[in-house]
Amino acid sequence: MTAGISGQDEKRAISASPGLRINVVVLSLAFILLLAILVVAAILALRQTRAQADVRDSLETINSLSRIQSELLDAETGQRGYVLTGDASYLEPYNRAAPNLLGEIRQLQQSPKAGVRDAAALATLYQLAEQKLGELQQVIALKQKGESDAATAKVREGAGKDLMDRARAILTSLFSMETRRLVETRDYAAEMDNLLQFGIVAAVLVLIVLAFFGLRAIRNQFREVVRIHSLAQAANQRFQLLVQGVTDYAIFLLDPQGNVTNWNSGAVRIKGYTEDEVIGRHISQFYTPEDRAKEVPVRALATAASEGRYEAEGWRVRKDGTRFWASIVIDRISDPKGDVVGFAKITRDITERREGQQRLEAAREQLYQSQKMDAVGQLTGGVAHDFNNLLTIIIGNLDGAKRALEAGQAAAQERVVRAIDQALTGANRAARLTAHLLAFSRRQPLEAKVFDVNKLLRHLSTFLKPSLGEKVQLEVVGAGGVWQVEADETQLETAILNLALNARDAMPEGGKLTVEASNTFLDEIYCSRNAEVRPGQYVEISVTDNGVGMTGDVAGRAFEPFFTTKETGQGTGLGLSQVYGFVKQIGGHVKIYSEPGHGTTVKIYLPRVKGATAAEAPDPQDAKMPAGPGGESILVVEDDDDVRAFIAETLRELNYIVFRATDAPSALKILATERVDLLLTDVVLPGRNGRDLADEAAAKRPGLNVLFMTGYSRNAIVHNGRLDQGVNMIQKPFTQAALAAKIRNMLD
């Protein structure tokens, strides 16, 4: 019995052995297979984790590159704004960007993910950024030292622009490489996800087999696989979140035909389309009708497909129909065989940057024109000074010769008198020429006073009509409540007369000339487009004709000295330059509006004066040449020997005692030993100028009368275009009568 049982058990054991062996083999194989699946799943999960890290690194690199580019642009914009305006607040972007720029690049260089090509590009970028910052700092230092011309010249050399262009090219290349890495990593993650899903199916089959042998163990393993799968899905979701987090760039994918297959949040913000509205649609919808007619989208994809990349800037259209200026990069995406499987497209809205560059270029052009006009003004001012000295000799001596001849027998001397009259006429024309030069150079001394523009125009109308001739119809129009202005009334009359004569010449067959005054306000928008103009209230004087008009090129050069379209001998080319210089000297503005065949309007804007009373014009008096009563002494200080001799002789004829000096030290010696009733001094003297001499003489001799004479004075007695308070001056060239009247007016 016992043996039977034992035998039966043995048989069962024997019979069970093959089954046990089978179960053990199956279980072992199942466990091996499961282990293999788990190993593969773990490898896939590890690769996804690494891919996720690579994606994060790429996005961080993209953001760093974007910051570097923005900091470069901010630094350059701040520097250019400061150079153009001199306002230190423009340096805020530069001061904010410069300290961080090189550190950002150095962090990218130290990144363990940087490859050999990246490292070389970053090293080059670091050198360019360092050189660019050095160039920016050098220009700012020049500007801070007051060397504005040197700073502007340094900017115009173009070295900074070349460095910026090279840095931008490297940044664009690095950004494109990182974008391709993003796309490749995403594709790789998707492939890992598919393989992981296949592994899950296999694992389920294995679990069914293992369920017969160990449900608990299989269930635990299954839970582990499910957990790994969840990690993979979470990694993919994080990848999508990272891509969607880039909002400054529209990043999306295209199929080989150019249809949108992927759309990020940056694209939604920039273009206005949601993902549901745009997926499957062709990129041509973002282009303007003009570009679509020129097949720009098709050619862009063809270029990217053949060359690997397409880069451009141009207008693009948002969903609401508005346009923006975009920077576009299209990169080809190829499979391992080299076939095109799609495109990666990056779009950035750079409208504000483009408008800023345009405003900067406009400001630079206005600055250049202003500097050019100022340089010509400096030249003409210097010429006028020396020329006026010569005219003082010519006019004075001719005037004396004429008077001497007129005292003799008129019949025998008639021819000589007539010749001298002609010489005086020519000399006076030369004097008017120098007056125009001084007006354009903004160096003429102005006797500014407050006056009513309407009264001035009524006075002008009486003598404009004979000058214009019978063919020209004159209409002078005032306006009620026209504001008062402060200017040199005589110079303003001359300016309007010059404009009227130019208008007459533009109407050879006759026409209509209108001179009118009105109140106006120049706002900040207008002033930003016109150099040297400040916002505020102005009195506008417009001179309009219906003559032949001017082309844009001629109008642009009309204010240049010696520029004329008239035939030789019919004009000096200084009429409009006198208008320009006079108006600018008193803080005003002048503008030409003209069109060929439709006439011309010249508008003069004079700043409004508040709280002042218009001065009454003095009654005209007969010209007098009063002599001195005798015993009065005058000290003449003039560095030009001929001018000094002429003035001394003229004063002796007027019965004055004359002392002469060539400079300030010699004049002070005479003042210390001699009684002097009036100091007559030139403003421009060697060493210390006439104003310095007058100040020291007044300190030593209180109450001393001082009369300045000048052919050209920059800042000694004239500031902001006006004579200093309490200054008496006579303008070279002058006649004996004018000098005599001025002296008696001061001494009596």
Image (spheres, rainbow, N blue to C red):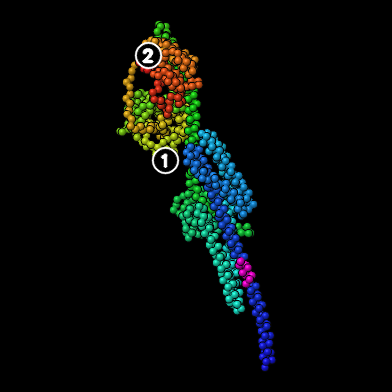
Q: Given the image, on which type of amino acid does mark 1 rest?
A: Ile
Q: Quadrant of residue 725?
A: top left
Quick check: 329 above or below 493?
below
In the rendering, at what x and y percent does residue 327 appear?
Answer: 52, 49
Q: Which residues are magenta?
A: 34-42
Q: Earlier in the sequence, mark 1 or mark 2?
A: 1
Q: Quadrant of the N terminus?
A: bottom right
* 651 falls in the magenta region: no
The secondary structure type at the circle numbered 2 is loop
* 38 falls in the magenta region: yes
Q: Quadrant of the C terminus?
A: top left
Q: Quadrant of residue 706?
A: top left
Q: Given the image, on which type of amino acid does mark 2 rest?
A: Met
| Residue 696 appears anywhere in the view | yes
Taking 398 as reference, is 618 left or right? Answer: left
Taking 342 as reference, is 683 left or right? Answer: left
Q: Residue at x 61, y 78 (%)?
A: 213
Tell me, for residue 525, which label it has, or none: 1
Residue to which mark 2 is pinned: 625
Q: Residue at x 66, y 80 (%)?
A: 22
Quick check: 111 above or below 437?
below
The secondary structure type at the circle numbered 1 is helix
In the rendering, at what x and y percent does residue 497 appear?
Answer: 39, 26
